[in-house]
Amino acid sequence: MTSAGCSGRPWSIHPVATGLWPEQLKVAARIRTLRDAGCGIARIAEMLPLYEDRNAWNQALDRHAESLTMAARQIAEQQSLLDTIRQEIKENTMSITVEERALPARRVPSLRRVVPNDEAEGPLWGEFMATLQSPGASQPPFGKLWGTTYFDAEYREADVDIALWAELTGPYDPPTGFTIEEAPEQRVAWTTMYGSYDHMDATTDAIAE
């Protein structure tokens, strides 16, 4: 019977005891270290033959280090996005309060258009303000209430019929394209949004509920 033991040198390892020769043990240790450093099987297979060529080996290590840096940066960005989502949820939960209010009767200049989609409301507001406040035009005596009226009976993704309006506190002769309307008293769902326009979706969702 073969005895598995040491050869008399306490640091030497007998191949029968391990099933591997010393050089194979070194390679196995190298594989384990690369694995623990984040190298996948394919990358380990590419790197192992380069070990004896120290320049090539160091270049391979540098490439892997660079990939780890990129991965760490990506993880940090993802964690930052999660923090942003948590903060938005916290802000929305704290600041969105919907209540019912009565809007008094008011006189408004109105700009009505059929726009391609909901997102086109923003540019239309730009046109609204640019026209009413253009150089040489009489400056309208705006009040505090501004709004958008949607005329379609159901939600539409395209060809949305809307009118932009702003409360007037005095006489005003609107430019071409605008009409002056006498809006009756209305009861509305009302909320005030705090923070950036990134919260607008959550705000409109709260009103819809």
Image: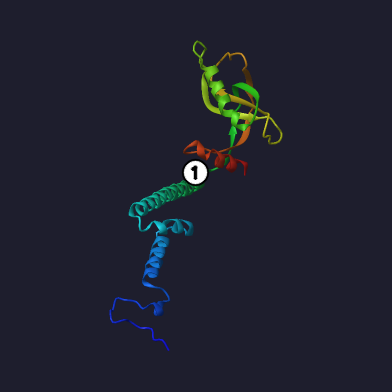
Residue 59 on image: x %, y %: 36, 50
**Residue located 38% across and 83% down the image:** 4
Q: Is residue 123 above or below residue 13?
A: above
User: Which residue is labeled 1 in the image?
Assistant: 95
Looking at the rendering, in which quadrant would you find the N terminus? bottom left
Looking at the rendering, in which quadrant would you find the C terminus? top right
Residue 63 on image: x %, y %: 39, 50
Colour scheme shown: rainbow
**Residue located 53% across and 21% down the image:** 129
Secondary structure under badge 1?
helix
- Which three-letter amino acid code belongs to the residue tagged 1? Ser
- Circle 1 residues within 10 Å: few <14, some 14–19, many ≥20: some
Res 158 visible: yes
**Residue located 71% across and 34% down the image:** 153
The one of 200 and 45 positioned closer to us in this rendering: 45
Tell which residue pokes out farthest to the left in this image: 9
Q: Is residue 82 above or below residue 13?
A: above
Q: Left or right? Give the position of 152 relative to 106.
A: right
Q: Left or right? Give the position of 29 relative to 136.
A: left
